[in-house]
Image: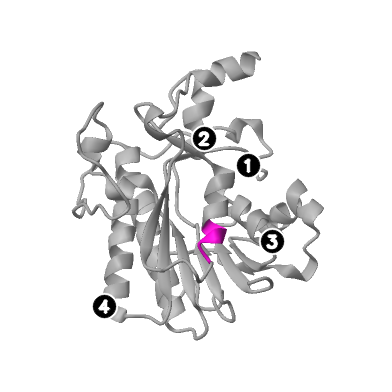
Amino acid sequence: MSGDLVLVTGGTGLIGIKTIHTALQAGYSVRAAVRSQAKADAVLATPTIQAIKPSSRLTFTIVPDILVDNAYDEAVRGVKFIIHCASPVIKGEGFNPDQYETHLVAPALKGTISILTAASKTPGIQRIVITSFEVAIIPWEEFISKEVETIFDDTYKIPFPAGPYSNPFEAYAASKVRALLATNDFVNEQNPSWDVINIMPSFVIGDNEMITDPKLISDGTVAAAMAQVLGGDSGWGAVPSTSVHVADVARLHVEALDPRIPGNQNFLAVSEGERGTRWEEAVDIVNR
């Protein structure tokens, strides 16, 4: 409903900043959780925010470390909805094997549990929308295969990925699986007054107004597209078969707040249908 207060975590990421823009344009008031005041200033400096002129409809809460206990307790007070986008992604040079658990898996799991726990202690919250990923419902062995006969949908469940992990993308995938399993366990065991919707995009591409340094243009899943025109490795391993635009992902997060949509379910966000994404078309687009 227009004017309702939404907490958006991970507000400076590719999906997070677009979700802030989309929620404001839809009429919501937004409280963005960021790591520092400098990050808040960067959000305010984006052209879209400047054009919207949200004034008091956009506020900020500083959460410097999502790994500490009770990290989101203050951030959730007074909000009606939560959109939890905060989660580590593979950037730049990525991570070495010693960092897979500490830098990818643990923050994703701890951050999700922290937001759920904070919400369970706070009255008035109606729904939490969480950014998951398609790899949360696809076993790693099948995800990297060229062809599989399995049909994966939003209800498909896979076992706990214990590791060790062969590369950072496998660790990233494991972080999403473990966060999804932890969410399901929390809801089943605690029976909270609010419900959860998981949005599961494929490889997210599109513009990111938070990026002002050209060297960072390939951070995150956007690298899968940029590697086609810049050369080199995307950092995500084999070329993925599917993609989805960040504007559509943000729209799904915001539209999922609609109470007419039943909670405690998952939604996949994948474009191009069975055709899949033809990444080489990026070269033709640039040439044109």
Instruction: Report x, y in % for residue 103.
Output: 39, 50
Q: Nearer the viewer, residue 64 or 249?
A: 249
Q: Amino acid at mark 1?
A: Asn
Residue found 62% across the figure and 18% down from its top: 286
Q: Which residue is mark 4?
A: 189
Front of the two marks 2 and 3: 3
Q: Which residue is mark 2?
A: 222
Vertical relation: 93 (above or below) 152: above
Q: Which residues are magenta?
A: 253-257
Circles 1 and 2, Cβ within 8 Å, touching? The answer is yes
Of the image marks 1 and 2, the number of the one nearer the N terminus = 1
Image quarter of the C terminus = top right
Of the image marks 2 and 3, the number of the one nearer the N terminus = 3
Question: Disc number at residue 97?
Answer: none
Q: Which residue is mark 3?
A: 24
Q: Amino acid at mark 3?
A: Leu
Of the image marks 4 and 2, the number of the one nearer the N terminus = 4
Residue found 40% across the figure and 58% down from its top: 107
What is the CA distance from the residue labelled 1 to the residue labelled 4? 38 Å
Q: Nearer the viewer, residue 275 or 123?
A: 275
Instruction: Report x, y in % for residue 40.
Output: 68, 59
Q: Amino acid at mark 4?
A: Glu
